[in-house]
Amino acid sequence: MTRYYDTGILLKLYTEEEGSDRVRAWVVRRREAVVFTSLHRTECVSALRLKAFRGECRLEQSNAALADLDTDAAAGVLKHTALEWDEVWERVEVLARTHAAATGCRTLDSLHVASALQLGAREMVTRDGRQAALARKSGLKVVNPLL
């Protein structure tokens, strides 16, 4: 079964945050490569640099987390998966027109759900409430490894 991980969950694999240990254990038990897109990569870089800016970690820790991410990508733990971005953006617009008024989803939430759908995922791994609502409305099973 293809699972799509929201970036907020992926970051818990590479940083020490509340719930990181539980997310790591949950992912390890699945023994599968984690789908990893250029959206994930860009968001991880941005989020790790923002953590340094906010003083939540030192720049060296941010660099180490990015190095770990690169190591896992090279080893196949993170499975780089390309998307056809024009098709993903078309799905984002459909999701926004159809569900944004009911779910309150922002563009980035919709972008992740559209990416999951484009990849044929059946599960969305997230703890974001709006994103979860949109994923459910789109036919995805939602999993929160922190519950």
Image (cartoon, rainbow, N blue to C red):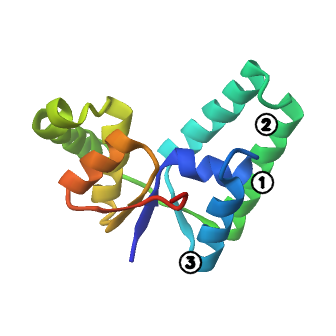
Checking the image for residue 30, the label placed there is 3
- Check the image and report above or below for 84 versus 121: above
**3 vs 1, front mark:** 3
The residue where tag 2 is placed is 62
Q: What residue type is labelled 3?
A: Arg
Q: Name the image quarter holding the N terminus.
A: bottom left
Residue under the image location 79 percent in, 22 percent down = 55
Q: Where is residue 57 in the image (x, y as percent from the top left)?
A: 81, 31
Q: Earlier in the sequence, mark 1 or mark 2?
A: 2
Q: State the separation of the CA atoms marked 3 and 1.
A: 20 Å
Q: Mark 1, residues whose alpha carbon is within 10 Å: few (<14), some, or many (≥20)? A: some
Q: Which mark is first along the chain, 2 or 3?
A: 3
Q: How far apart are marks 1 and 2 (CA)?
A: 10 Å
- Whether residues under marks 1 and 2 lie with C-beta atoms below 8 angstroms apart, the answer is no
Q: Is residue 66 above or below residue 121?
A: above
Towards the viewer: 67 or 52: 52
**Local secondary structure at mark 3:** helix
Horizontal and vertical percent position of residue 70:
72, 53
